[in-house]
Amino acid sequence: MGFDFAGHGFKCGIEVHQRLDSKKLFCECYCDPGKPSPEGRKAVLRRRLRAVAGELGWLDPAAAFEAERGKEFTYYADSNSSCLVEADEEPPHACRSEALETALQAALLLNARPVDEVHFMRKTVVDGSAVSGFQRTALIATDGWIDTSKGRVGIPTVCLEEEAAGIIERKAGTAEYRLDRLGIPLVEIASDSSIKDGEHCREVAEKIGLLLRSTGRVQRGIGTIRQDVNVSIREGGRVEIKGAQELACLPALVENEARRQLAFAELRKELSARARPAQQVHAVDLTHVFAATKCNFVSRALAAGGMVVGVRLQGFAGLLSREVMPGHRFGTELSDYAKAFAGVGGIIHSDESMQKYSFSEAEVAAVRKILDCSESDAFVLCVAQEFDAVRALGAVFERAMQAFEGLPSETRKAEGEKSVFMRPLPGAGRMYPETDVPPIRLTPAFVKSVKLPETFEEKRGKYLEAGLNKELADKVLRESDSAAFEDYCSTGASPTFVATILVETMKSLKRDGVPTEKIEASQLKQFFSAFAEGLFVKAAAPLILAELALKPNASVSSVVEAKGLKKFGAAQLSEVISFLQKQGFYGERLLGEAMRRHRLNIDAAELRRALSRKEDAAQ
Amino acid sequence: MYSKKIQFALRKAGAKPGFRVRVTESKRVFEGILLPRPEAGDENCVVLKLENGYNVGIGFNAKTRIEALEGGGAELEKFARARNKFDLHLPSVSMIATGGTISNRVDYRTGGVHALMTPEEMLANAPQLADVVNLRSVLSPFRLASEDMCGEEWKKLAVLAAKELNDGSRGVIVTHGTDTLHYTSAALSFMLKHLCKPVAVVGAQRSPDRGSFDGSMNLACAAHYAKGNIAEVAVVMHGSSSDDYCLAIPGTKARKMHSSRRDAFRPINCLPYARIWLDGRTELLRKDFHGRAEQEVVADAVFEPKTALLKVFPGASPELLEYLIDKKYKGVVVEGTGLGHVPTEPADKKASWIPAVKRAVEEDVVVAITSQCLYGRTHAFVYSNLRRLHAAGAVFCGDTLPETAFVKLGFLLGHENLSVEEARKKMQENIAGEISPRLTEQEFLV
């Protein structure tokens, strides 16, 4: 049965982040992670970030959370894709005007009104993804909207900001990043919370994505567009899920989160009948219990100087195995907290099968005894270095106790259709002015001068008129680069042929293992122009493309020649016809036989015309 | 400052920065905290901090309405403080805060920059300090950006530092803007006589509002230096672009070599005293320093303001030097080319500096020669033009850095009982580590 979104007071908003295809926002570096680029000189930087007090003198909870983990960050810089600006060793240059213009185009397409003066802000980020400890971001426009199948959805803000550094690896106490992505301009579009359900969320995200693409100045490929969704239900908390990349996963991701919130609301109802245990977190060293354990990973960890630390959760027996999302139990949730707060590998809890870990009954009994667990109590173990294990169990205990209050507000990370805990939800005090970048006045005259691109609806109409069927037109718009499509059509090749090659032939070749990405745009244009000039027939197209992919420097005509794929001219057609007539083929049978033998060189319509001319002449 | 029109509208609405206000345009309404107008940008835009944290400028015209709202305002210009705990087991050091990036604080709402001066505010910026030393005092004799400092301030700093050291401080940390930090470290090197405890001069290249504030590690390393055993004036700043260690660079041999990098300060013509890691580990890189001792530190705090530093360039006219002589300057450090050249026999004979140098010497103006190469020594005899400059009476300062030579000359000329001849002689002798007796392979581009 579907989830009753309206009945549970479901609220959902979305933020779409799209990378723009221009040099970086505040320096002269260019990077498109989707395009291979030559490597430059490498540098490795090691930095620490400290928590900074927010505007009111207190630390932002999210910032403090990261700083508390005492991380040292390693940054890998390549001189071709980053400079001293990304390394936080040089102040920002002036804001890139073409990025600002693209952001304004997006804003206007979303019916939003640009602000009069743009003020760049520093948004505190201490997870290491910005070397400076902040991301530069500015509000560009407000009060926009889009129409959807389920009514109008507001777009309160359109922002222009810097992309974060790309994570390589996150470990306890450290994280590694690459600087190539850092600083790529990013447009952030936020909807209001009027999204009705998971499917609607997908529709809104897709609409915004298509509008952004119609500017023609966005990066394409994996990771270049991503969605953050905010979900809450009446009895839940405010939860932000970051980094959803697959539109197809959005409906389930949103529904799973709503279900998770509902599960915790129900849990709270159950718990409200009980008194909250007057228990403080009390982590106990249980290492000696496992001195001779058969559990391999525990004995390995102990040999490496680790400890087994345990904590009792009074009255939680049976609750930890409760499913809060498909395949995701309360215990998994606690484990995510342990991982996020202390960087440990995970936890072991008493609602799991102890055989799975090869723990003996005596070991489990000893743990229960030492922790003073009654039958209704649960226990959680953590195997790690002492400091990390104690910190992990502290986080687990706090989260378990929060179940009495309901759902904590948190930031989660999308993983397909599910999400895992990332950090507490940041407070509002995360931003302060970027004084290195002066405010930018957007005069009405300047805003007027921003040219709006054709929207997808307009393009679609144009393509239908050019003869594409609906399906093909949509595919061109969604799956390929419409600017390139139009460019290829300018060679004179029929739009339907160009579209079929781009959205069908190339894809099926790729599925068959042909490296079609190696075909240069210039080769492709040559290919279409050769087709328009009648150098080859449609049936030969896949063979030619496959050859071009293997020989990136080859010209189309040389490939056609070498492979014997040149279209037969009038003389050759006449020869084929005469030859087959001598063999006793006439009319439709002759046409069939000719195509069977020379499919790759003959255009059927031309053959038919040639045959009728010849037959006419014979009569 | 806002435009007159906006100021009038604000007065009428009874609103001022920090108030929550509503600004209504033709079709749009903004609510947020009114901010003071930043220096840059359009004075005719009202700046609000919206609830979502963004600041935004709203163009003001005849149709714009501003209303003050009840409650929800914010106290601007409020800064974090941390308790200055006193741990009897830790050594006590003094801090002298002068200004500059390291002791600046951005107001998170307005973006305005303000100086921090109390120990509590300093500790909020660099909490690790409290684990290394006790700050027995944070003195703030003046608050100046480093480009605004001069001999007068160096004298005050020397007097204060000597007093603190003699009053029982284990060491002194001087926080400073970075632009002229190396001038100050040189001045303290010359002015603190019988120095027997460490003096660390420290700054920051990134502001403390950000998570990546480099001054946090610089201060911690400076604290380690101040309680250590190198009884010299040293610049303690990042050694590399990473947050791993600081270098303690001799005060007369440090130079800012980059306008923005963390590791801008480099030792020139020498090795640093030590590499100091964040955890206090100190790797000594040389042995020729004074160790800690018990004796009275004397502040020989004098400086002759009529001292100048002049850079030679192709086509530089001797009028520049003549001007300084006319203006009664008592000493001029010339940053010559290569081994210490000035224009000597140019095609236009009138452009030679030799007559001007001769005149300076005749009028008791000390002309001291340094090299704009920075690395390596000057030399008076390798080329005939150098010999002529020497014969004209200019003194060659060996490998003394131009900025250090300027400070040294001003310091020497500040001594009224020191004759011009003695000052000329001392410019060629090492007083505080400014002239290296030997230069070796490993001291280049450290």
Image (cartoon, grey):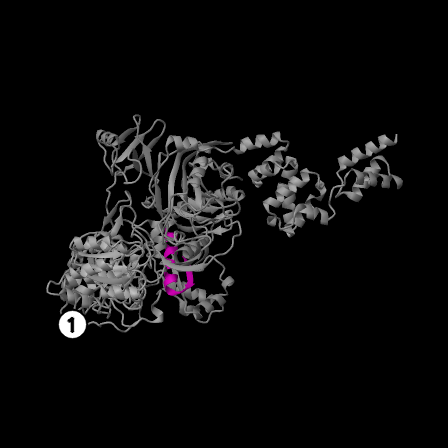
Q: Which chain is disc 1 placed on?
A: B
Q: Quadrant of the N terminus of chain B?
A: top left
Residue on which disc 1 sits: B294
Q: Nearer the viewer, residue A233 or B354?
A: B354
Q: Residue at x 53, y 46 (%)?
A: A221
What is the quadrant of residue B44 in the picture?
A: top left
Q: At which x and y percent is residue B256?
A: 30, 58
Q: Residue at x 43, y 65 (%)?
A: A365
Whether residue A109 is situated above or below residue A47 in the rendered picture: above
**Residue A143 shown in magenta:** no
Q: Left or right: A416 with respect to B115?
A: right
Q: At which x and y percent is residue A117?
A: 34, 36
| Amino acid carrying mark 1 in the image | Glu
Q: Nearer the viewer, residue A112 or B324?
A: B324
Secondary structure at numbered mark 1: loop
Q: Nearer the viewer, residue A235 or A520?
A: A520
**Residue A387 shown in magenta:** yes
How many numbered marks are there?
1
Q: Is residue A567 visible?
A: yes
Q: Quadrant of the C terminus of chain B?
A: bottom left
Q: Is residue B136 visible?
A: no
Q: At which x and y percent is residue B110?
A: 27, 42
Residue stretch rendered in magenta on the structure:
A372-401
Whether residue A271 is situated above or below residue A159 in the rendered picture: below
Residue reaching furthest to the left: B417
What is the quadrant of residue B5 in the picture?
A: top left
